[in-house]
Amino acid sequence: MSVFTSVSDAELARWLQNYAIGRPVELRGISAGVQNSNFFVTTTLGRYVLTLFESIPRAELPYYLHLMAHLARHGLPVPAPIANRDNEYLDTLSERPAVLVMRLPGVSVMAPALQHCAKVGAMLAGLHLAGQSYGRRQDNPRGPAWRTATAEAVKRFLPAAEQRLLDDELAFQRGVDLAALPAGAIHADLFRDNVLWDGEHIGGVIDFYFAGYDALLFDVAVTVNDWCTEADGQLDPARCAALLAAYHAERPFTPAEHAAWPGVLRAAALRFWLSRAADFHLPRAGEMVLVKNPDEYRDILRLRIAGVPALDCGAGL
Amino acid sequence: MSVFTSVSDAELARWLQNYAIGRPVELRGISAGVQNSNFFVTTTLGRYVLTLFESIPRAELPYYLHLMAHLARHGLPVPAPIANRDNEYLDTLSERPAVLVMRLPGVSVMAPALQHCAKVGAMLAGLHLAGQSYGRRQDNPRGPAWRTATAEAVKRFLPAAEQRLLDDELAFQRGVDLAALPAGAIHADLFRDNVLWDGEHIGGVIDFYFAGYDALLFDVAVTVNDWCTEADGQLDPARCAALLAAYHAERPFTPAEHAAWPGVLRAAALRFWLSRAADFHLPRAGEMVLVKNPDEYRDILRLRIAGVPALDCGAGL
């Protein structure tokens, strides 16, 4: 999340008359994130987050908003979107598609211990189980088509060795059949900065705007690549075991998922190398934009190609 | 809320497999309240309240649950019901209709200051505004029919002077036309113990199981009779002014509401005198039941009959 578009106090006050949440008390931009403009909004009746969508097509937004609403109403701590007085989640502000969501308590933990990883694994399984009854379907926006197009766009910026790495991995991934694995609504970006810890509990899982229908195992791989990785990119077997055992206790893996795991970890690493490379080499204009280093995921990809622990990661599953 | 029906840890664990909120960690009965069995339920993924319905007919429950869901999705801090894996709010446990709702933060404030009353007034207006778009309709379960039946049931327990007070007030209320006033979904029981304060903010408005379609002004009167009343039952003009001004700022009163106010304050007092008299004289069996003193609302009714400040209550509206 970042701020690309400004909103004045007067514009906000006028716009909030579409809602039933009282009068604005405070409006503050949020600098984290890479895709939308985000603000903390405090009113006389509550605390919310306002998001203005800068790049996601309006027609794709209902999938995300209704997914968040669906997961929230299944009891999971995700940012429930707020309906306006016309009963609609999606509104317009500053000529952008706009939504208010509930603000959730907590702060990110960037150096997770084993118990954090276990709780994230259980939460991810809860999201996947609740998501099974979500009626809408929209493909993962960072799926194969995006991967091919983004690889083409960034390749010319890469040194020769990275171009070869990219070509080889794209060829390998064309042989990985994610469609054969259990699928459903996935978060697809469950990094440490998208989990808010309220003490020892998860107070919020945020930023669902990369969600989509895809293999559940891809979501597990994205999560493990972030939560269970050392500073040098190597997987930490103990954190892997904690996360995967907690996930597996709620949703046991299938034999096909066991077999696919090493390739899916690579697919998840490739996806973030590509998006970070695109953000780095092809930046968009903005007031407060946070661009992440693409080399981290290039290195993670190389390490996952070199070899990964079996899916049980020491959990003895 | 009280506990009439027991639930074992094993029963809860089995039942929670219908949901996507992880494994039970703690189950604890709640002693406050008069109508249902309530428990705090903590799981690996969150904190919830479990309610088993002891007396409300199952067919009437969807109105309450969907109202809570509607208000929650409009951004107000009410206990959102949790859907099970079949996407249903209403389930069954211990042979009772059962629902899980989100547990909200905060504690009741039993000696409210002016700023509490103002925030409650603004919140009540928010509930009324958001409720205008609620599509279901169910009459106030403590409306005229209930009033007549309950008065008949309790009258024989009352001393002669109270029987006369009751007869006279029932005759007076037959001349008060609530149906002529702006109506919608009302909470109808917004007492101090049904508002949770998280610091200076309202963290939760709870216990919607007396809600129904009725005059919005009746809800304001119920609220004022509790929040703005001294220990002797007299209205406190300053707290009245704070609550009503904050409400009025969000939803201005109509001339008809101004005219009806003294009679509606009496109707609201009568409703709680009657329900407490019924709970006192006609108690139900239960493990941990809290019965409130009916004399408090008998006295409030007498004082409201003796005279009340005009609707503006000093707010200068």
Image (tube, coloured by chain):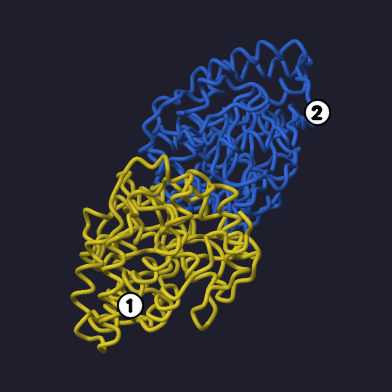
Chain colours: A blue, B yellow
Q: Secondary structure at mark 2?
A: loop
Residue where numbered disc 2 is placed = A287
Q: In x, y percent, where is residue A270?
A: 63, 26
Residue at the image position 57 percent from the left and 64 percent from the top = B313
Kind of residue indicated by mark 2: Glu
Mark 2 vs mark 1: give the one in front.
Answer: 1
Left or right: where does residue A298 sit relative to residue A16?
right
Task: Classify residue A6 by image quadrant.
Answer: top right
Give the distance between the C-alpha atoms of the residues marked 2 and 1, in whole angstroms.
60 Å
Quick one: B97 or A240, which is closer to the camera?
Answer: B97
Residue B110 against residue A32 in the figure, above or below: below
Residue at the image position 68 percent from the left and 50 percent from the top = A108
Q: In x, y percent, where is residue A169?
A: 61, 20
Q: In this orientation, does residue A1 appear?
A: yes
Q: In x, y percent, where is residue B82?
A: 39, 52
Q: In this orientation, does residue A125 appear?
A: no
Quick one: B66 or A171, which is closer to the camera?
Answer: B66
